[in-house]
């Protein structure tokens, strides 16, 4: 109860503290309103797409002689983005200034509208940071290719075909040097090659998250494409439906959390020992979870489904399947590029091992056995029953990890939940690998000539 | 003092050729004409080889006044060339090449390079910039507040900083370009009556006013040059660097007395006492002010504090500085503060709209000079005469003014309160305690970060957040150490969490525990079971004060704040960006605070050590960088590391207030390479610290087995500093000394601690006007051959062998090894030996052990890191 009261207190305090902070311009939303547009004065009928922080774009028909202006929120006629003069005529190619007013009763003398003198299709671009608006000619409809190829100095001018995940998106993990990236529709540059470029010339490869950055096209073979300022691993995404681009610099995750109706604590992500993945000591791009999944374990909210969180938060990025209710089996791609709340599904209870590769964005599910949850059975071999299948016997009791038997010399590492290596032994067939361990979850990797296994153990 | 100030202002006026008011640091906003290139409606000002101001006004009107962000444009004109052809104008400096299509608006929509571009070389390749180009690689700055901070959730609110891995960054100073809180950068004009600058509309509110910073990865120069145009980071008064007692609670005067008594009886050094909002009538029954007052208040709640002047005098008598919390947004109310209301209303002759509900209220009209004058002269002056030393502003309401479109309440409160203090209390150093209000806020120190949740993930965010704020010069964040509010009863008073937060706080600019008004949250540290560990951290803070204050002065001089991201020093190393929980605390200390719960008392942390060697204070070892090490720490250990060659000045344990000027200083020296250090001193609370200060320099060098430490004569003059000082010099990573001379005279006042490889030399009191030379001859072969009473214990990592030597035969020797959880891992017994060696291969690696040796009646304990 106290927890509920505390949460409520924090929530109410937040409300009282932040109420009334709304005089400010917002860089997250903009709507075009007026009889010049089809949506008329309906405040939220014609949203503009955000292409950068505070920069919005809309393509559509404007009627000649009819007024239009912009609204900075859709919760009432409060935040107006208007012309600087009454009935201001704006033509293609011109940049006009804008004024912002936060006023529930904006006087007519300030409530200035724009007009065009010719009905037609326009691209309207508004930059709230510079308070400018510009109308341009719409770009002719493009046909987008079925295959994209990447090259450029950042890739040592090698050409990579961008992988496609069905008809959802193109997605490719690449390792870059400082340089540039070119995206084209042929594997070799030629006279017919079309180059697909970002809205913002030479923008960094990691740009695009949260923005509607649709690809443009050029036939200029000298296009700069994207810039790579910082060498490293990147993931690039191109949506098949909207042809929008996004990139990100890959940073290995330290934490992932499994939640769902088939999880022991259901949708509660608070207990790391139950829902937390652990890093794979052999591969920094992988995290592993091992435990029991049971249909309807804790209630009937999506009882056979789960998804994966990247933070202990419902608003941060989460990992989910491209298609809702995809069966969790084998290796499947993970989607991170939209906000859909789709989940994976299981069809049978039991112990599972789930390996997530955050660089390739894949999830591998292994059904281990119909056994129940981890139980420390007294001899310390909890959670490592699969080890017997490789004829490797581990003992994990008395605050230690010990190789009881291995048919061949193996390298053994013990890693704690934070990803720090606690101990390692090389080339052993038996012996203590780590002792005096604190209680908790550890990952033990055993690698030999024919053995390559990872075990999650509970001490 | 006043004479000094007058001379200072006169010199400023003459040298800068500008109208200099008595407020914040002066500047001349009009650039040298030689730096300016005009082309049609565009104007370019070349400020440094890496920085160009770009203006465009379709009215051809340019801004030469100061703005909220930029106060000085009169810099030495760098070398540059201009040229043009029929289409373009070119401006070229050593670092940048600007290309402008004549007669156009530099900014296109969507953004492109067609009208204006700047190219530069960065990391061996040409980099292109144009107005409006997005930059996802910006290294970020800070955000207004950590209110509601939970784990990493505030990361997305952090505004862009002045440096980027792209090699360039931009200061958007156009009025049209809103800051994160929706406010704008107005012009500033001198106001003779107030004595400081007041806001004014920009000449052309639609004009483009952008500063391009193309510093590549020379991050420190970018930040330093920023303070040339945006003003220096002021040096706060020394007392703010001490420990603050702070907790929101309806404390009565007796409660405060009890707190002061407890602080004293528990020997907790403290310098600041905070009175949170219940000092005034707040309308709540629990604070005995039902029906009177509210969130905003100006009059003492005399039910709780019947004699405020007496209480504040008691606090001052006990060497506390006092600050009161203000939430000014609701104005001045006739029920809460009838006398103040009447006096202000009369002074303003009823000019402002006086609302009628719940008594009459003069709204908060800080936008206007007459309200401001009346408010400060009526209310603030009176409280200051009662003993209030500075103000904790806590603006949490509408972020921009309801009366002036785009005037940011946070920034404007900062500007007015800070400058009012600078003007009206010239014998004190101006300081406020408020929040970040956008670029330029670094001129109004210090900051309080606000209401973070009590949990480890939130603590884990703060090292990154604190150091990153230096990317906009906002180098004095003070956090609610321990966290502010809780949602999890398991962590609310977790002693380990509070200890770790306090230990982190030692290495932050402001050292203040605090929490919200919830009786379940404890912030009286003496009530925690691990209070001795907390007290040790507080004492470490007081020991570090001379170093901290010296580094704070450096922030004033250079623009490089105390807490510094690793990439300032190592921009080419990926680890300098990825190890976000580490930072430099000043020039010579690398900090990697523990921000996760331990496992059975042991915290494991993987730490990146940059190039060079680093002395681990917790483990008494020199770590050779570059490397990444996983280390274990006990609950009392704080992972901080001195740079090899550093000389760090410290206070002795006797210091109970940082405002003291002790006549004894400790120098912690890390041997291994030549190095230097400095001690900065001033009066502590003087406003003329720009010119009234003193410094003492230190150097160390080594030639063969002879080490020399120099303490140079103090330079500069400050009235209340001791004329002579004694020093205790601790030289870590040293071999045992064989002879010591001080100023050429043999000294016997030295010792050697083999467990910390530390030579300690006592230097008797000596005039600060003269130099001291300390010469130490060391044993060429380490500690072998030195006769000491205690056994000598060596651990050789390469052979994984522990060796102990006793100097003479011992009948009975016992070796015991313990891990940090206290479990015995190894036990060996020997008889009739003078030394032994033991392989430790049976013990797991990457751990810390305590080795205990009992040799007859001698006991020796040493830490061993495998």
Image: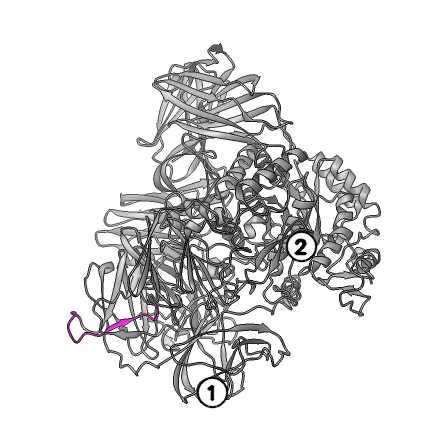
Can the viewer see residue B585 in this picture? yes
Residue B684 pos. (x, y %): 63, 35
The magenta stretch spans which residues? A187-200
Q: Nearer the viewer, residue A361 or A251?
A: A251
Q: Is residue A196 magenta?
A: yes
Q: Residue B148 appears at what percent x and percent y?
A: 58, 60
Q: Residue at the location (58% across, 63% down)?
A: B201
Rendering coords of residue B827 (x, y %): 43, 30
Using the image, determine if residue B308 lies above or below residue B199.
Answer: above
Task: Determine the secondary structure under disc 2.
Answer: loop
Say few, some or many: other residues with alpha carbon within 10 Å of mark 1 (under 14 / 14 to 19 / 20 or more): many
Identify residue for label 1: A37
Residue A316 vertical placement versus B373 (above, below): below
**Same chain letter for marks 1 and 2:** no
Q: Quadrant of the N terminus of chain B?
A: top right
Q: Is residue A259 left or right of residue B280?
A: left
The residue carrying mark 2 is B516
On the rendered structure, is B175 left or right of B796? Answer: right
């Amino acid at each position: 109860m106290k927890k509920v009261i505390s949460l409520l207190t924090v929530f109410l305090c937040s409300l009282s503290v932040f109420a009334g902070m709304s005089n400010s311009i917002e860089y997250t939303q903009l709507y075009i309103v007026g009889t010049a547009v089809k949506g008329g004065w309906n405040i939220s009928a014609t949203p503009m797409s955000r292409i950068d922080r505070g920069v919005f774009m809309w393509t559509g028909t404007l009627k000649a002689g009819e007024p239009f202006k912009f609204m900075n929120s859709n919760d009432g006629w409060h935040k107006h983005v208007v012309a600087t003069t009454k009935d201001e005529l704006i033509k293609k190619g011109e940049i006009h200034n804008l004024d912002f007013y936060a006023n529930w009763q904006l006087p007519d003398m300030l409530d200035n509208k724009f007009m065009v003198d010719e009905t037609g299709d326009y691209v309207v671009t508004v930059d709230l940071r510079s308070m400018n608006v510009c109308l341009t000619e719409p770009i002719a409809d493009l046909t987008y290719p079925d295959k994209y190829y990447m090259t450029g100095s950042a890739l040592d001018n090698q050409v990579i075909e961008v992988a496609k995940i069905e008809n959802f998106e193109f997605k490719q993990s690449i390792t870059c040097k400082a340089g540039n990236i070119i995206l084209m529709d042929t594997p070799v540059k030629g006279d017919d090659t079309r180059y697909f470029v970002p809205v913002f010339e030479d923008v960094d490869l990691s740009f695009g998250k949260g923005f509607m950055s649709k690809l443009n096209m050029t036939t200029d073979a000298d296009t700069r494409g994207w810039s790579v300022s910082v060498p490293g691993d990147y993931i690039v995404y191109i949506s098949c439906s909207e042809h929008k681009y996004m990139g990100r610099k890959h940073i290995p995750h330290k934490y992932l959390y499994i939640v769902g109706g088939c999880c022991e604590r259901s949708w509660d992500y608070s207990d790391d020992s139950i829902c937390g993945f652990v890093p794979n000591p052999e591969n920094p791009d992988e995290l592993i979870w091992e435990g029991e999944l049971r249909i309807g374990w804790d209630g009937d909210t999506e009882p056979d489904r789960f998804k994966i969180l990247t933070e202990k938060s419902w608003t941060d990025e989460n990992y989910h399947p491209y298609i809702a209710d995809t069966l969790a089996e084998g290796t499947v791609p993970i989607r991170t590029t939209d906000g859909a709340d789709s989940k994976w599904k299981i069809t049978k209870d039991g112990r599972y091992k789930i390996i997530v590769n955050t660089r390739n964005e894949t999830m591998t599910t292994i059904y281990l056995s119909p056994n129940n949850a981890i139980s420390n059975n007294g001899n310390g071999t909890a959670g490592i029953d699969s080890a017997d299948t490789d004829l490797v016997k581990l003992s994990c009791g008395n605050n230690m990890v010990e190789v009881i038997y291995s048919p061949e010399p193996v390298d053994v590492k013990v890693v704690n939940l934070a990803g720090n290596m606690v101990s390692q032994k090389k080339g052993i067939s038996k012996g203590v690998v780590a002792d005096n361990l604190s209680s908790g979850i550890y990952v033990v990797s055993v690698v030999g000539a024919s053995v390559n296994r990872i075990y999650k153990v509970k001490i | 003092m006043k004479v000094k100030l007058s001379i200072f202002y006169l010199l400023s006026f003459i040298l800068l050729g500008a109208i200099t008011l008595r407020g914040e640091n002066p500047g001349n906003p009009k650039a040298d004409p030689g730096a300016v290139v005009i082309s049609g409606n565009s104007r370019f000002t070349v400020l440094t080889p890496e920085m160009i101001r770009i203006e465009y006004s379709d009215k051809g009107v340019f801004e030469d006044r100061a703005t909220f962000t930029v106060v000085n444009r009169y810099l030495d004109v760098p070398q540059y060339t201009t040229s043009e052809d029929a289409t373009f104008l070119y401006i070229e400096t050593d670092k940048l090449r600007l290309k402008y299509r004549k007669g156009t608006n530099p900014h296109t929509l969507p953004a492109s390079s067609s009208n204006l571009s700047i190219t530069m070389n960065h990391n061996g390749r040409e980099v292109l910039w144009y107005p409006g180009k997005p930059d996802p690689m910006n290294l970020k700055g800070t955000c207004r507040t950590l209110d509601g901070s939970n784990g990493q959730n505030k990361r997305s609110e952090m505004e862009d900083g002045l440096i980027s891995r792209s090699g360039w960054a931009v200061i958007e100073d156009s009025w049209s370009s809103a800051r994160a809180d929706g406010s704008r950068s107005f012009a500033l004009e001198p106001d003779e009556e107030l004595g400081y600058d007041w806001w004014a509309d920009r000449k052309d509110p639609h004009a483009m006013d952008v500063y391009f910073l193309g510093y590549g990865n020379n991050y420190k120069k970018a930040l330093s040059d920023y303070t040339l145009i945006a003003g220096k980071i002021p040096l706060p008064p020394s007392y703010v660097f001490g420990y603050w007692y702070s907790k929101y609670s309806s404390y009565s005067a007796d409660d405060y007395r009890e707190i002061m008594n407890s602080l004293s009886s528990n020997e907790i050094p403290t310098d600041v006492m905070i009175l949170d909002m219940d000092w005034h009538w707040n309308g709540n029954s629990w604070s005995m002010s039902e029906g009177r007052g509210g969130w905003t208040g100006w009059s003492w709640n005399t039910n709780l504090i019947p004699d405020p002047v007496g209480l504040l005098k008691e606090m001052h008598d006990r060497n506390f500085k006092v600050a009161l919390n203000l939430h000014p947004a609701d104005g001045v109310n006739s029920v809460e503060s009838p006398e103040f209301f009447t006096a202000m209303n009369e002074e303003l002759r009823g000019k402002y709209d006086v609302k009628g509900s719940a008594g009459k209220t003069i709204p908060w009209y800080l936008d206007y000079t007459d309200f401001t004058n009346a408010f400060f002269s009526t209310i603030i002056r009176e409280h200051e005469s009662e003993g209030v030393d500075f103000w904790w502003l806590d603006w949490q309401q509408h972020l921009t003014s309801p009366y002036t479109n785009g005037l940011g309440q946070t920034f404007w409160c900062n500007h007015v309160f800070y400058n009012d203090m600078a003007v009206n209390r010239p014998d004190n150093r101006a300081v406020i305690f408020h929040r970040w209000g956008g670029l330029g806020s670094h001129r109004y120190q210090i900051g309080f970060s606000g209401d973070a949740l009590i949990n480890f993930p939130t603590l884990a965010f703060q090292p990154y957040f604190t150091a990153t704020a230096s990317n906009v010069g906002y180098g004095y964040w003070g956090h609610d150490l321990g966290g502010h509010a809780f949602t999890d009863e398991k962590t609310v008073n977790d002693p380990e969490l509070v200890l770790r937060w306090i230990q982190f706080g030692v290495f932050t600019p402001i050292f203040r525990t605090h929490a919200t008004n919830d009786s379940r949250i404890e912030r009286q540290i003496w009530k925690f079971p691990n209070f001795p560990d907390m007290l040790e951290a507080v004492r470490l803070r007081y020991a570090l004060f001379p170093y901290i204050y010296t580094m704070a002065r450096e922030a004033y001089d250079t623009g490089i704040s105390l807490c510094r991201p690793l990439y300032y020093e190592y921009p080419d190393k990926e680890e300098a960006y990825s190890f976000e929980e580490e930072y430099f605390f000043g020039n010579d200390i690398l900090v990697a605070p523990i921000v996760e719960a331990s496992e059975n008392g042991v915290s494991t942390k993987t730490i990146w050590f940059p190039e060079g060697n680093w002395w681990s204070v917790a483990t008494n070892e020199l770590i050779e960088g570059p490397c990444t090490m996983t280390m274990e720490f006990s609950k009392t250990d704080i992972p901080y590391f001195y740079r090899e060659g550093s000389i760090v000045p410290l206070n002795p344990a006797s210091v109970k207030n940082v405002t003291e000027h002790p006549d004894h200083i400790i120098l912690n020296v890390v041997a291994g390479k030549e190095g230097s250090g400095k001690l900065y001193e001033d009066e502590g609370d003087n406003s003329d610290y720009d010119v009234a200060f003193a410094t003492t320099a230190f150097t160390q060098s080594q030639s063969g087995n002879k080490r020399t430490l120099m303490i140079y004569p103090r330079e500069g003059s400050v009235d209340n500093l001791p004329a002579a000082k004694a020093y205790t010099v601790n030289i870590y990573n040293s071999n045992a000394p064989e002879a010591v001379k001080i100023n050429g005279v043999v000294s016997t006042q030295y010792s050697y601690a083999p467990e910390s490889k530390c030579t300690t030399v006592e230097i008797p009191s000596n005039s600060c006007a003269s130099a001291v030379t300390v010469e130490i001859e060391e044993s060429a072969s380490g500690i072998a051959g030195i006769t000491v009473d205690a056994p000598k214990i060596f651990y050789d990592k390469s052979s994984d062998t522990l060796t102990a030597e006793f100097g003479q035969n011992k009948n009975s020797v016992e070796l015991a090894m313990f891990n940090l959880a206290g479990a015995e891992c190894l036990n060996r017994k020997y008889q009739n030996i003078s030394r032994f060696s033991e392989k430790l291969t049976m013990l797991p690696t990457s751990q810390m052990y305590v080795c205990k040796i009992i040799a007859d009646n001698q006991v020796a304990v040493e830490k061993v890191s495998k």
